């Protein structure tokens, strides 16, 4: 569909908005969880890199929210900060806490979990972005091209950490295997479009759920071989599907923190 030459139908516009909310909310929550590692990563280089990745990812979320604003969904800042947890379309994986405790108070965070989640999420994001570069909605395709340039370095960073820890001590490998299990338990809705599956897939906006899952499996196969792991399997049916507004209490707590400053001065630009 050439959007420059034709008027978008209500059905097509609805599919675009649904997908954009999923993309935006994913990166918004993933970025927030990454920001909670500021000053807490294992060493200064990792701290700087993770902070940069989180900043980039928040920028990606901002671009998606801006596209939604252009489609009349509301002000981008409000879409990011004012929507209820039940209105969010992010995957369960992106909202999960980093570990026990609270940032700068008692942060008993799990670096193995951060690495496992980031590596597997970033691989999934790469598969989606590659497909979005061919999206029928040209503004989204243009954003995807920009995201892909930064995503190359994000993948490189997490590939290195994943391989390093999986080839490290027995303690590190045990922690990583436990973390990978937890991540995969929440991976069931990462490639889901929820109840908007038919609308999104028929619009030519992005590849089908099944196609993207297969490409993700192919993309991680070299790493699985390198670290002597069996191939990971995405759950057939997620316990909760964030695409349909089903979430955990972790999301509500995250949104309270994320919106605190914005609610003090809604005229500010985030």
Image (spheres, grey):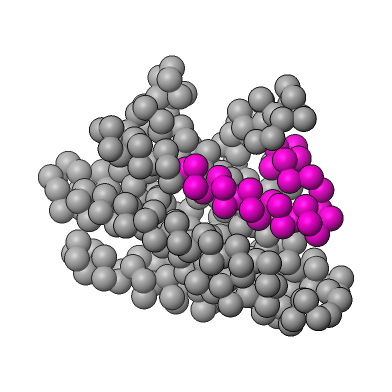
Query: As drawn, is 158 to the left or to the right of 264?
Result: left
Q: Quadrant of residue 141?
A: bottom right
Residue located 77% across and 52% down the image: 69
Quadrant location, the C terminus: top right
Q: Nearer the viewer, residue 79 or 210?
A: 79
Residue 253 lies, with reference to residue 67, above or below; the image says: above
Quadrant location, the N terminus: bottom right
Query: As drawn, is 48 to the left or to the right of 224?
Result: right
State the extent of the magenta-drawn residues as a range: 54-82
Residue located 45% across and 24% down the image: 103
Q: Is residue 241 visible?
A: no
Residue 24 lies, with reference to residue 126, above or below; the image says: above
Give residue 252's position: percent from left, percent from top. Answer: 64, 35
Q: Is residue 227 visible?
A: yes
Magenta span main SS: helix
Q: Nearer the viewer, residue 153 or 117?
A: 153
Q: Quadrant of residue 189?
A: bottom right
Residue located 37% across and 27% down the image: 39
Give residue 255's position: percent from left, percent from top. Answer: 64, 34
Query: As drawn, is 248 to the left or to the right of 170?
Result: right
Residue located 80% across and 68% down the image: 13
Residue extending farthest to the left is: 169
Give residue 130's position: percent from left, percent from top. Answer: 50, 72
Magenta highlight on residue 94: no
Give residue 88's position: percent from left, percent from top. Answer: 69, 48
Magenta highlight on residue 55: yes
Instruction: Please state the total of marks drawn on the protein image.
Output: 0
Query: As drawn, is 200 to the left or to the right of 26?
Result: right
């Amino acid at each position: 569909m050439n959007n420059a030459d034709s008027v978008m139908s209500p059905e097509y516009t609805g599919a675009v908005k649904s997908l954009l909310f999923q993309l935006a909310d994913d990166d918004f929550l993933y970025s927030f969880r990454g920001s909670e590692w500021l000053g807490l990563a294992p060493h200064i280089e990792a701290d700087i890199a993770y902070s940069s990745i989180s900043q980039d990812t928040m920028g990606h979320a901002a671009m998606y929210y801006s596209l939604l604003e252009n489609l009349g969904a509301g002000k981008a800042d409000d879409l990011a900060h004012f929507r209820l947890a039940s209105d969010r379309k992010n995957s369960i994986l992106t909202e999960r806490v980093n570990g026990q405790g609270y940032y700068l108070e008692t942060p008993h965070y799990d670096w193995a979990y951060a690495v496992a989640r980031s590596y597997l999420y970033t691989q999934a994001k790469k598969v989606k972005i590659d497909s979005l570069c061919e999206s029928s909605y040209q503004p989204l395709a243009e954003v995807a091209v920009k995201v892909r340039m930064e995503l190359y370095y994000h993948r490189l960073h997490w590939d290195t950490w994943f391989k390093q820890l999986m080839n490290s001590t027995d303690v590190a490998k045990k922690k990583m295997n436990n973390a990978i299990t937890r991540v995969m338990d929440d991976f069931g809705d990462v490639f889901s479009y929820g109840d908007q599956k038919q609308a999104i897939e028929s619009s030519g906006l992005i590849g089908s759920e099944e196609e993207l899952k297969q490409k993700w499996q192919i993309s991680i196969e070299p790493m699985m071989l390198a670290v002597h792991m069996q191939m990971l399997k995405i759950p057939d049916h997620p316990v909760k599907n964030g695409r349909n507004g089903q979430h955990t209490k972790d999301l509500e707590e995250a949104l309270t923190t994320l919106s605190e400053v914005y609610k003090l001065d809604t005229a500010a630009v985030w």
